[in-house]
Amino acid sequence: MLEIAKEFKLEANYIDGQWVQADSGETFTVENPATGESIGVVPNASGDETKRAIEAAHNAFKTFKKTSVKERVGMLRKLRKLIIENQESLAQLLAAEQGKPIAEARGEVRFSASYVMWFAEEARRVYGDTIPSPWADRRMIVTKEPVGVVGAITPWNFPSSMLARKIAPAIAAGCTIVCKPAEATPYSGIAWGKLCEMAGIPNGVVNILTGDPIEIGKELTGNPLVRKITFTGSTRVGKILMSQSVPTVKKISMEMGGNAPFIVFDDADIDAAVEGAMASKYRNSGQTCVCTNRLFVQSGIHDKFVEKFAKASEAMKVGQSNEEGVVQGPLINDAAVSKTEEFVEDAVAKGGQIITGGKRHALGHGFFEPTVIANATLDMKFSKEETFAPIAPVYKFETEEEVIDMANDTEFGLACYFYTRDLGRTFRVMEGLEYGLVGVNEGVITAVEAPFGGFKESGVGKEGGHQGIQDYLEEKYVCIGGLGI
Ligand code: ADP
């Protein structure tokens, strides 16, 4: 059992700088997905509490938008320092509610700190424009202003860093924010409230609510005081939030589902490709939106690749997050395991060949065996749907044109990966793939410095990179006339 430090395991919501319970007094239980044990209970807030949090954020915005960039950078630096100082407690909390190996949880917390640092740096570079004026007696400038109150909804797969990508640019830009973390992993979200309180971020600037996703979502998207919605999660829910945001014409940033192809050409360095595929497929037990969903391997090296990849998959140590050497934890809940079983059954019924794994792990609860399935075909469920599981279907292909078509044959367009040592092919394939993130001879490419965001139904907008702060800003064109020049 993981030791969970008390200072960040808070069972209250953070609204306008106050620690409060739901109006109804109701709570919901949070479970450790590796053991099924209850970790504790958090408030089950609803629409009214959300409305109050929005109003607090709206009031706080009136003064927060006037703070100097230097003040906001100071706050972000303090926030980053606190995250680093409390890395171990935050990682334990995260691992307990999410199930990921403690090393990955520590990495995620450090990644959150990097986002905070990145946006502290970017805050200083929110430049406007001076436009050469077509009128002799007028001058034209473009300034940037914070959009206002932001509503943020985040998923359970990266309960800390998905909020970092939203809270840090909001503060950097001078916005205020109301956040709703996922029900499965609310503690890491609430911890952001504590960190912001400790960092001296003014009351009402960052608010954290846990509870009913539908009611909280309706208020965040429907309330006219909210000027922007930022969401990370499934395409299904993202579409609901987009449509709910239409009547009040909110700005939206959406990081939604993926169906990442991982393509290995005959000329690839096969060991590097296996290593990349392992990292890209099994990170967080396959539960990331940039995880490889489909592996396409050219016929000349297909058998050799499958053999090596299956061997590496079999060698993975599956277990509790605090066990030595564990690289794969459980899936988030039993529904996720049942869905994984369904995908495997569907593939086998259609001619898929299980090379390794294929069933629930002997450890029980959320655990599933790392699974490699050869003879994958386009009619199998995982060809179209995101698996979010440690199952790796392998499709055999012959030509470059054919594989580009197969890789693009999805409504998603978030991440893709390919391995080749041919320079011409590198550019042809990179340009042919309709994806927002492309890894060439690399299986893990996310970095705070780079823009993260999908094409097609995978999303709208970018997080991270110098682009990441722009979504939190409005551009204002100002024409100054009557200068008498
Ligand atoms: P996942 O499939 O990764 O769980 P979801 O899209 O279901 O992704 O969940 C992501 C976030 O969206 C979570 O915080 C969840 O509570 C929230 N959510 C789910 N349904 C709704 C909804 N109808 N309105 C607003 N938020 C929702």
Image (spheres, rainbow, N blue to C red):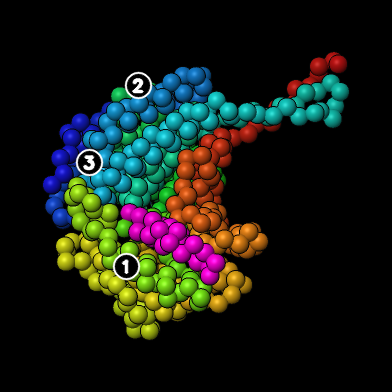
| Res 89 quadrant in image | top left
**For the residues marked 2 and 3, what is the alpha-carbon distance in whole angstroms?**
24 Å
Q: Which amino acid lies under the numbered mark 1 shown in the image of this protein?
A: Lys
Q: Height in image: 289 above or below 206?
A: below
Q: Earlier in the sequence, mark 1 or mark 2?
A: 2
Q: Height in image: 300 above or below 125?
A: below
Badge count: 3
Q: Earlier in the sequence, mark 2 or mark 3?
A: 3
Residue 106 placement (x, y as % from top left): 30, 41
Q: Which amino acid lies under the numbered mark 3 shown in the image of this protein?
A: Gln
| Residue matched to label 1 | 311
Residue 224: say if magenta: no
Residue 267: say if magenta: yes
| Residue matched to label 2 | 200
- Give the residue displayed 47% in from the left and 28% down from the top: 120
- Give the residue displayed 81% in from the left and 28% down from the top: 133
Q: Earlier in the sequence, mark 3 or mark 1?
A: 3
Residue 36 placement (x, y as % from top left): 16, 56
**For the residues marked 1 and 2, what is the alpha-carbon distance in whole angstroms?**
51 Å
How many C-alpha atoms fall within 10 Å of the one at disc 3: few (<14), some, or many (≥20)?
many
**Bounds of the magenta segment:** 256-284
How many C-alpha atoms fall within 10 Å of the one at disc 1: few (<14), some, or many (≥20)?
some
- Give the residue displayed 56% in from the left and 37% down from the top: 466
Q: Which amino acid lies under the numbered mark 2 shown in the image of this protein?
A: Gly
Judge by depth and name the residue closer to the eye, 129 or 242. Answer: 129
Residue 337 appears anywhere in the view = no
Question: Which of the numbered marks, if any, corresponds to residue 70?
Answer: none
Question: Which of the numbered marks, if any, corresponds to residue 92?
Answer: 3
Q: Is label 1 in contact with label 2 (beta carbons under 8 Å)?
A: no
Dot 1 lies on which element?
helix
